[in-house]
Amino acid sequence: MQDNCNNAFSNTGPRVVQKFGEKIDLSNTDAVTEQCSRYFKDDKIQTIVFDLENVRYCDSYGLKFLIYSQRKAIAEKKQLLLYRPDTILLDMFSATRLLNFFTIVEE
């Protein structure tokens, strides 16, 4: 996991981008959950973008983290966007019937 969090502003309001490294798994989900929890609590942030472009591996802990994050975003009335997930993640979302649960963006 990389700690490259950049505040950016668009016409949809304030957003934050969380960039991930090559994996989301047991070794890093606790740290990233703690880091991202502040975004869900921040009233100024409306959109949270998970940049998954570099992720090549995701285990069940990583999937649990992504589901938790989506549910947390819904509960806090925020939008969570998954940016450019790899085919490996898309296949996992499809196999677990979660493809439509997430908002996936390519641009």
Image (tube, rainbow, N blue to C red):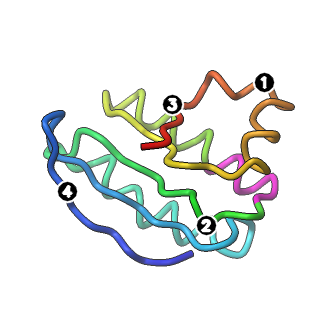
Q: Which residue is mark 3?
A: 103
* Secondary structure under the numbered disc 2 in the rendered image: loop
The answer to whether marks 1 and 4 mark residues whose Cβ atoms lie closer than 8 Å is: no
Residue found at the very far right of the displayed protein: 95
Percent of width and height locating residue 22: 67, 72
* Secondary structure under the numbered disc 3 in the rendered image: strand
Q: Which residue is mark 2?
A: 54
C-alpha distance separating marks 3 and 2: 18 Å
Q: Type of residue at label 3?
A: Thr
Of circles 2 and 1, the one toward us is 2
Residue found at the very far front of the displayed protein: 107
Of circles 1 and 4, the one toward us is 4
Q: Residues within 10 Å of mark 4 (few under 14, many from 20)?
A: few
In magenta segment, residue 63? yes
Q: Is residue 89 above or below residue 36?
A: above
The quadrant of the image that shows the N terminus is bottom right
Q: Which residue is at 59% across, 67% downward?
A: 30
Q: Type of residue at label 4?
A: Ala
Overall secondary structure of the magenta section: helix
Q: Relative to residue 23, is residue 94 drawn left or right?
A: right
Q: Which residue is mark 4?
A: 8
C-alpha distance separating marks 3 and 1: 13 Å
Q: Residues within 10 Å of mark 2 (few under 14, many from 20)?
A: some
Q: Residues within 10 Å of mark 1 (few under 14, many from 20)?
A: few
Part of the protein shown in magenta: 58-65
Q: Which residue is mark 1?
A: 97
